[in-house]
Amino acid sequence: MTQEKWGQLRERLLKTVGKNNYTTWIEPMKFQELEDGVAVFSVPTNFVGNYVSQNFADLILYELNTSGEDVRRLAFRVAANSPARPAASADEADQQNEIDMLNVAPVRSASVNTPLDALQTAPLDKRFTFERFVVGKPNELAHAAARRVSEGGPVTFNPLVLYGGVGLGKTHLMHAIAWELRERQPELNVLYLSAEQFMYRFVQALRERRMMDFKHLFRSVDVLMVDDVQFIAGKDSTQEEFFHTFNALVDQNKQIIISADRAPGEIKDLEDRVKSRLQCGLVVDLHPTDYELRLGILQNKVQQHSATYPDLNIRDGVLEFLAHRISTNVRVLEGALTRLFAFASLVGREIDMELTQDCLADVLRASERKITVEEIQRKVSDYFNIRLSDIIGPKRLRSYARPRQIAMYLCKQLTSRSLPEIGRRFGGRDHTTVMHGVRRIEELKLTDGQIAEDVEMLRRALEA
Ligand SMILES: Nc1ncnc2c1ncn2[C@@H]1O[C@H](COP(=O)(O)OP(=O)(O)OP(=O)(O)O)[C@@H](O)[C@H]1O
């Protein structure tokens, strides 16, 4: 296997395990060699090797094998230059490496036949608790629903579906529910996994003719949580199995919690019967963050950082500035703050406006970009292959009117322009026409999958 191929596989792993797990566990692994079916990786510490082996080895083996490599086992070597293991000389380092590898291979390796129930240990992030989740208007309903489910009382809504854009706290809330349930009712069998892991387990069970084990495992849980369910869209047999698992658990009155990056009705290639099952329970939306929530999150994170950097002072106005300037995605906000603290501690300065602007110049520039009405009109006309003048002009043909309404809708969503202003830029139309257009698209998004997808694609293209 080449380094390049490992690079591609890592990209795939990033999607499966999520950014946090990826940065902590997968990124530090360096591929070294593949020999006799054993893929050898160097890792900075024993701990990383053990953790990866216990939690991600199956997944890595699966990715390697499905990409055409014949790998039966993974082995981990502690890197010679790792600070945790200083070596006096190169020889000694080599020797140490070899010993490490030979000693630990049987423990840290995972065969392709890992028992299916190994899944019970799918890792939960220690930081993703309710205590650390900041509640504001955009997420209060999702938070309240998550809290209710985490009390473990009688199942009142099944499933609970949490949906929303990237980095808005879906995974955080799911982990928080799992932690809380473990605390309150340790006897409950709570299973959290991503939809991709579900698929992988299913494929593995099929391949090894262990479907009975698979069904037994998934039907014996008390609470099932599946993250990023949109992943199974278009994967027919996985959807089918998911559907049966889902029904079996609902019949037994077991709680199911699902997350998705959009409303179930808007997930393309998700079977209608799965969509309708998901819509049977409580579907709640995590809205993009607003200024107050971003500020709250920043204040909360500052408290956490202060434990690591007790001497760092942060000047008034800096957090407000960041909450104004940085995008709705909490992950970006967190990353900015982490960088700020690390930088300030390195240079031994307090965190003031100047340092913030220096240190976060790239992040601030990226979030500076404002989407304009003209840009939206241009993108929409390109997308529907019509002329810009047809979007703005008076023609009422459906083939122009619908794209025009979509463009108006996007202007309302993505710019701060008022309805009369938008109307003016669409050939001097009245604000009631714009309002009608926006409402029409809102309705159609719920009933017409194609329109929902067109709008979503355009939104992504514009925000990219
Ligand atoms: N309300 C909040 N309070 C505190 N931290 C938050 C909040 N919302 C999100 N975060 C943090 O933002 C980061 C991203 O959140 P999370 O991984 O839950 O997002 P997600 O919605 O699952 O996104 P993705 O679809 O990309 O997986 C996490 O570190 C999480 O702790």
Image (cartoon, grey):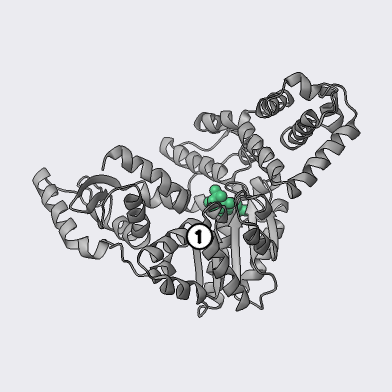
Closest to the observer, 183 or 375: 375
Which type of secondary structure does the marked residue at label 1 adopt?
helix
Q: Is residue 9 above or below residue 248?
A: above
Name the residue that disc number 1 marks: 238
75 left or right, relative to 326: left
Residue 364 position in % (x across, y down): 57, 31
**Label 1 Cα crowd, 10 Å radius (few <14 / some 14-19 / many 20+):** many
Left or right for 230, reference 16: right
Q: Is residue 301 visible?
A: no
Q: Quadrant of residue 52?
A: bottom left
User: Does label 1 point to a residue whose CB lies under 8 Å from ligand 1?
Assistant: no
Q: Residue at x 54, y 60 (%)?
A: 239
Which residue is pictured at 74% across the width and 26% down the height? 373
The residue at the point 82 percent across, 24 percent down is 426
Q: Amino acid at mark 1?
A: Thr
User: Is residue 112 at all visible to an observer of this figure?
Assistant: yes
In the rendered image, residue 306, in percent from the top left (x then y), is placed at 51, 50
Determine the image quadrant of residue 222. bottom right
Expressed as whole percent of the image width and height from the top left, the position of residue 406 reads: 75, 35
Q: Which of 438/447 is in front?
A: 447
